Image (cartoon, rainbow, N blue to C red):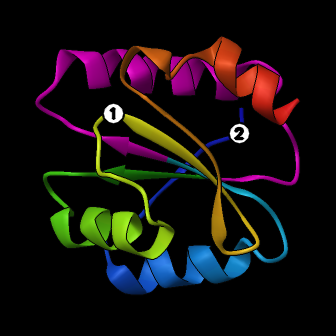
Amino acid sequence: MTTYREITTEAEWEQALEASADKPVLVLKHSTRCPVSTAALEEYEEYLKDKPAEGVEYVLVKVIEARPVSNRIAEDLGVKHESPQMILVKDKAKYWTTSHWSVTKKHMQAVLD
């Protein structure tokens, strides 16, 4: 199973953003206090268990526990903060984003596969 890496510091986010110049980075911004976000995390994990796209880095940011990182992502990519929120980053820029009930395995397959 492909796994995701949790980002907890702005330095880790900067590294992921830089890495997006070489390969796409899929970020899930997750709230540990929100049932909609829990459902989104389950969809993310289901996608990763199946046949996830290769050559993509998968990351998770917990928006409450890592608020500065979450805010920095919104600022760096010019996207309004939402949670749950999924952002595909390519070439150090937002390529695609969705949020709330639209964070589904089906959407990930459509965009990544």
On screen, 58 above or below 24? above
Residue 106 locus on image (x, y percent)? 68, 12
Task: Label 1, secondary structure: give it.
Answer: loop
Q: Which mark is residue 32?
A: none
Q: Which residues are magenta?
A: 28-57
Q: Which kind of residue does numbered mark 2 sit on?
A: Thr
Q: Earlier in the sequence, mark 1 or mark 2?
A: 2
On screen, 9 above or below 27? below
Q: Which kind of residue does numbered mark 1 sit on?
A: Pro
On screen, 6 above or below 47? below
Who is closer to the viewer here, 8 or 104?
Answer: 104
State the CA–CA distance, disc 1 to disc 2: 20 Å
User: Dividing the picture into quarters, in which one does residue 16 lie?
Assistant: bottom right
On the rendered image, what quadrant is the N terminus found in?
A: top right
Task: Label 2, secondary structure: give it.
Answer: loop
Q: Are marks 1 and 2 in contact (CB under 8 Å)?
A: no
| Residue linked to disc 2 | 2
| Residue linked to disc 1 | 84
User: Dividing the picture into quarters, in which one does residue 44 lie?
Assistant: top right
On screen, 46 above or below 79? above
Residue plotted at (79% across, 77% down): 21
